[in-house]
Image: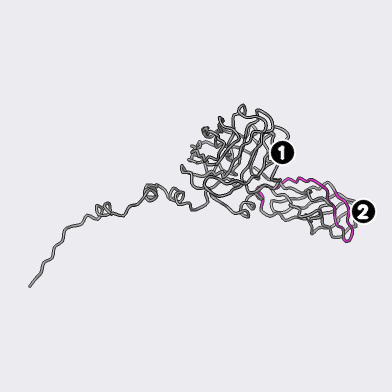
Amino acid sequence: MTVKITKPEINVREELNQLKKPTGIAGEAMLRAETPQEQQALIGVGRRNLLINGNFLIWQRGTSITDSSDGPYNYITADNWVTYYKGTYAQVEEALPIGPRVKTMRYTVGDTGNGPNFNSPIEDGANLMEGQLVTMSWWMKASKTGTTMRARVNNVGNGRYASSQYVLSSDISYHEVTTGWTYHSATKVIKGDLTLNHMNFELWADNADWDHNDTFQLANCQLEIGNVATPFEHRSYGEELALCHRYYYRTAPANTYSWVAWGGYCNTTTNAIVFLQLPERMRAVPTLGHSGNFQVADGFSVHSCSGPSLADPTQENARIDWTSSGLTVGRVAAVRNANDASAYLEFKAEV
């Protein structure tokens, strides 16, 4: 006997559309994402934050800096941040409403009429952002209400805002400041005809709103490609420090007689040559700065020295010549702080 079995046709597409399992808000967002980049942003994978030291962890110049004059735009506070107005800039740890304790930058206004003005450059950022949507995000608070901060991303040739090195490349958004921590974000459309190499994350205020000793604080600053403000990307202290060393390196004495450079020799009775391996390859061949008192060890003798200068520097190492007296030609040489725990060498290659 022959048995004939029949079954209804199934429309697979309709069945899939009618699945009972809910996707939820997050699942629907993933399904709506048009590119892998948008999906990565939604689930928080990959490197997103284009700002270096947006968490204000690294302050090689010191964690409390008082600027006694207005302008020019300069690097004097947290690494990779440029400020303009006089006042005190300090690293302060606080808890955000979302829970974690974080490092912040607090600005105490020096003179009435000097408002907060913060900038962070992104090296070669024009290649990444030209014609793109980018999103800024940050936390902020102040000692007063009734003021606003302005936010923008601009095309720059350097971090110091020379008029020939600045091209407007996005709109300005306005954000109200309160006395409690509030989260802000702004999506910007970057122009497609950028002429300079770098980009700049900018937050600034209307100066007329600010009085002497008013305070403003900033935390967890982020800039990312796309139109979504994702959770802040936390990097370790070591990783952030290594990123900062590409642009700036300062020796950090552990005591009053810390060694800063060695492996050298005395080539004359008045000149000692020492060598220093930089911790990271710098953005460009650095310039040298210094402060405090040093001495050169010439075999078993120690001599005061001054006037360090770079000779044949590269992005990775430095030969430093020191002027001294009474040296013995051919002896090995090394340089240390001379009873001065605040003495330092600094190597600068910032944007």
Left/right of residue 161 with respect to residue 192 in the rendered view? right
Quadrant where the N terminus is found in the figure: bottom left
Q: Secondary structure at mark 2?
A: loop
Residue type at mark 1 is Thr
Viewer-side residue, 167 vs 228: 228
Looking at the image, is 312 positioned above or below residue 200?
below
Q: Please give the label number shown on residue 326.
A: 2
> Which amino acid, mark 2?
Gly
- In the figure, 195 relative to 42: above or below? above
Horizontal and vertical percent position of residue 153? 55, 37
Question: Does dot 1 land on a helix, a strand or a loop?
Answer: strand
Chain part drawn in magenta: 281-305
Q: Is residue 292 magenta?
A: yes
The answer to which of marks 1 and 2 sits earlier in the sequence is 1
Residue 214: within the magenta? no
Q: Given the current orientation, which residue lies at the most extreme right position?
A: 326
**Name of the residue lying farthest toward the top:** 208
- Residue 134 pos. (x, y %): 50, 41
19 sits to left or right of 126 = left
Mark in front: 1 vs 2 = 1
Q: Mark 1 touching mark 2, by CB under 8 A?
A: no
Percent of width and height locating residue 210: 63, 30
Residue 56 relative to residue 46: left or right: right
User: Residue 66: which disc?
Assistant: 1
